[in-house]
Image (cartoon, helix red, strand yellow):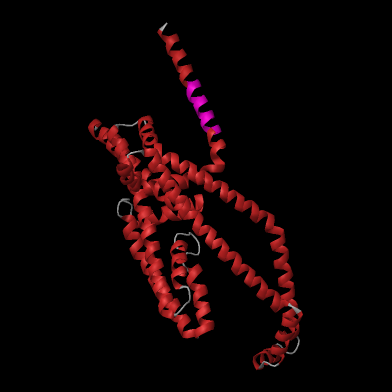
Amino acid sequence: MVSRMFDRERVIQIFFFGFLAVMAYELFVLLQPFLTPIAWAILLSFVVHPLLIELDRLVRRRTLSAIIITAGVALGVILPAVYLSGRLATEAQSLYTQASSVLSAEGIGQARDWMSHSDWIASLNRRLGGHFRLEDEAPKYAMEVAQVASGYVAKNATSAARNALTAIVDFGIVLLVFFYLLRDGESYYESLRNLTPLHEDDKETIYETLRATLSSVIRGLMLTALLQGITIGLGLLVCGVPYWAFLAVIAAGAGLLPLGGTALVWLPAAAYLTYASGWIWGIVLVVWCSISIAIIDNFVKPIVMRHGTGLPTMALFLGIAGGLEAYGPIGLFVGPAIMSVFAALLRVYRKTYGDRRKEAA
């Protein structure tokens, strides 16, 4: 009788955990298209949680506090996005007008006439042996490039519109999840802690490690991006680049990007300076930005991000690099979090099972 009851209980357990695994997989498939916006909402709610606590003390209504912060975040993203989109559309239209005038028959004629009377072009033609005349061939290549660019834009216009619509939908999901995490996130957190089948002190070790890691990584990225924006802004101001404050803000945002970073701002600015003010000012800006960004990235950022994670600098670097490769931009946070949680699990294992081995010996 006892054996039959044991077998029945074992069958029930196998069925339950098997069914749970199947449903967990189906849940993953269901939420997979939205995992990235959900992850960004979690990180964003983590960042503003201290602000939520302070606001809740004044308002004393969690739902209203969550609505106020969500509306503030939405306006903080939407208004700059609308402004930048308008500026981008204006600049694109201006660039298109200038390119059209240059590639017109009159513009090509002027360019050919200039190249025909240029000593530098004549010297280059002599070096080419007379088989290739730039004043004849360059306009042809310019027209071909313009045709290819026009065809590419026409071909990818639908894809760009679809990507813009996807970005709007993802942003809506971020705001929705962000609001509910602000309002009910603490209950979700406690429920997850209670579901974790570990001793209470082990739970504290793992969850505190995760909290400290995310806090350190976010604090480090934000601080270094701010420092990069300030140093690049000072360089742009001293060198006389117009709209230096606007470009400094763009540089601070670009500092959070995994590829390119602030170079997306100061390299074009240096090229502009070389054209407008001479190569000396362009070199000054390149040297200033290169040295300051190198110091911030290689000295300031590791010190700030290492504090709180408990990870060696090499492990932190590998966590960030591997996270970017595996998860994209969100890997900036996921990679170090995985490293830190794994290290915490090793500490729990050493404390729990390593002590037992010593006692058995």
* Left or right of 311 in this view: 139: right
Q: Is residue 3 above or below residue 293?
A: above
Marker count (numbered): 0
Identify the residue at horizontal 41%, vertical 46% (top origin).
68
* Left or right of 38 in this view: 119: right
Front residue (pair 207, 143): 143
Dominant SS type (magenta): helix
Q: Is residue 166 above or below residue 60?
A: below
Identify the residue at horizontal 75%, vertical 85% (top origin).
109
Residue 140 appearing in the image = yes
Give the position of the N terminus as an image quadrant: top left
Front residue (pair 286, 129): 286
Give the position of the C terminus as an image quadrant: top left
Identify the residue at horizontal 70%, vertical 67% (top origin).
149
The answer to if 18 sits in the magenta stretch is yes
Q: Which residues are magenta?
A: 14-26
Q: Is residue 13 above or below residue 231?
A: above
The answer to if 356 sits in the magenta stretch is no
- In which quarter of the view is residue 347 placed? top left
